[in-house]
Image (cartoon, rainbow, N blue to C red):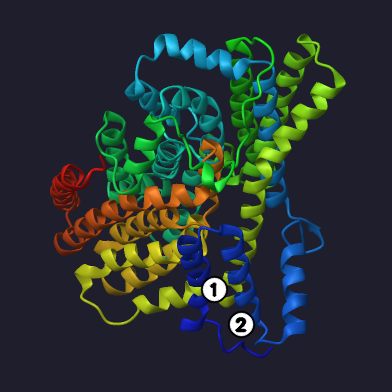
Amino acid sequence: MELHPFIQTSWSLLPPLLAILLAIFTRRVLLSLGLGILLAALLLQQFDPISTLVHLGKSVFSLVWEDNALNDWNVNILVFLLLLGCIISMLSRVGATLAFAEWAQLRIKNRRQAKVMTGLLVFLFFIDDYFHSLSVGTICRPITDRFQISRAKLAYLLDSTAAPVCVLMPISSWGAYIIALIGGILVSHGITGQSALETFLVMGAMNFYAIFTLLMVLLVIKGGWDLGAMARHEQRALAGELFDPAKGAPPGVVDHTVTPGRVRDLLLTIGVLTVVTVVSLLVTGAQALSKSTIPFSIMAALEQTDVGKSLVIGGLAGLLVCVYAMVKHKMSAAAWGHTLKVGIKGMLPAIYILLFAWTIAGLIGELETGKYLASLVEQSLPLFMLPAVLFLLAGIMAFATGTSWGTFGIMLPIAADMTMAIDAQLLLASMSAVMAGAVFGDHCSPISDTTILSSTGASCHHIDHVMTQLPYALSIAVVSVMGYLALGYTTSVLMGLGVALLCFIAMLAMWSWRIKRYAPR
């Protein structure tokens, strides 16, 4: 088979860069992604127009049907989005969303308490980042709207708690996936003194980006830390403009309450959705384990679980609760039709972006952009810089490909191989830096599915979420790089954390001056 001349070369960076830069400067996400997809396909087919169209058709078709079978992961995520759209619309129709907002308003007295609730709910929905962003967004949006918190701020709170918490939690889809990768790496290098779970927990203390992102979220909740574009969005929200109306209606489902509702309809729906999803995660994991020789345990089940299928099962259970509520309210056939139509229509913009993002991610994978970026690290550099360089490379890879999981899969084995060949003492530091960099790149990337779903959960314009989160992500990335330089130089976790903390304080001091000096009036 002839090797494409653009594979694993600097040319392979062009499609993701084109899509990302156009999205930032034109703010037209679908157009930008579409042009990036077209360029990637042209490069793969050496600019043959007929072959390019054929390859594009195959790539799009593979989103739902691949290797003579249904693409379960993609289809299940799309079905879950549609189910959640219908759930949100039905809860709105029976008045449950408004009732919850009114109930919470009696207990939540100010904007800070509304933000605290949004931030704390991650510890109930940490099992999966998709689940967290969409479910917590559904619950909190009526409350944050009531207290005139911008949709961009809500999206930031969702996105900046979802991945950082999931990547630190062993009992989550992220944790299980990473632990499985770590287990394979330990076996391949003959490391037997420590289990994959223990290794994962030790690495958590070296995930500087996740740790300091969560600290930044606490400051944002406390108030007064509206960096860059976020300050403008918050100022407009206080004037009653929760999102930019010039960009049209954002993705998500609008409230169309027509009847008084009850809080318990919303709480029961979310409760059933959560419990059934968690049980399904364990059941599907146990079913996979039954076909192997691995004994059952919660961690082993989460490593083998089917997240997409579990989300759909949980979504169906939640939908049934909403159907019961609609029946109790004796809705007419026209009301049923309108409610479901509104729910599906509200999710379509997010689905379109997700389909385009998946397509460009697949084509970027064929161009082997990730492997090219990884090869850049193999050039000579001082040993102590290795964790910091791996952090940046993982960030660039996740930013360009839009996937932190894909970055984990590519970069963790490469980081382990490089470190073991040079200095085994830096093994955990290097792998931690990859994990941190992947989350950083994912936070910055407009083609990241987690970023897209956080925008959807908050009903925020996608590019507004990207641009308002960027100053926070870049600031914490600088803090993380300094921490990894110190960690690499001293091989001391405490020293790395200490230097990162000092840099974090210095960063806050700098932003504090800029906020006072340049805050809009």
Q: Nearer the viewer, residue 333 or 26?
A: 26
Q: Nearer the viewer, residue 519 or 384?
A: 519
Q: Quadrant of residue 227?
A: top left
Q: Position of residue 360 (x, y in %)?
A: 60, 66
On residue 263, the disc is none
Q: Quadrant of the N terminus?
A: bottom right
Q: Position of residue 63 (x, y in %)?
A: 72, 59
Q: Position of residue 508 (x, y in %)?
A: 18, 45
> Which amino acid is tagged 1?
Pro
First in sequence, mark 2 or 1: give its number. 1
> Which amino acid is tagged 2?
Leu
Q: Residue furthest right?
A: 333
Crowding at mark 1 (Cα within 10 Å: few <14, some 14-19, many 20+): many
Under circle 1, the secondary element is: helix
Q: Nearer the viewer, residue 306 or 407?
A: 407
Q: Report whether 357 appears left or right of 121.
A: right
Give above or below for 204 relative to 185. above
Q: Which residue is found at the position 72% from the left and 72% from the top?
A: 56
Q: Report whether 300 appears left or right of 73.
A: left
Q: Which residue is found at the position 20% from the left and 75% from the top?
A: 382
Give above or below for 20 relative to 209. below
Residue under numbered circle 2: 43
Q: Quadrant of residue 182?
A: bottom left
Give above or below for 426 relative to 493. below
Residue under numbered circle 1: 15
Q: Are marks 2 and 1 in contact (CB under 8 Å)?
A: yes
Q: Position of residue 248 (x, y in %)?
A: 58, 44
**From this viewpoint, is residue 441 visible?**
yes
Q: Report whether 54 appears left or right of 370.
A: right
Crowding at mark 2 (Cα within 10 Å: few <14, some 14-19, many 20+): many
Q: How many marks?
A: 2
Q: CA distance from mark 2 to mark 1?
A: 9 Å
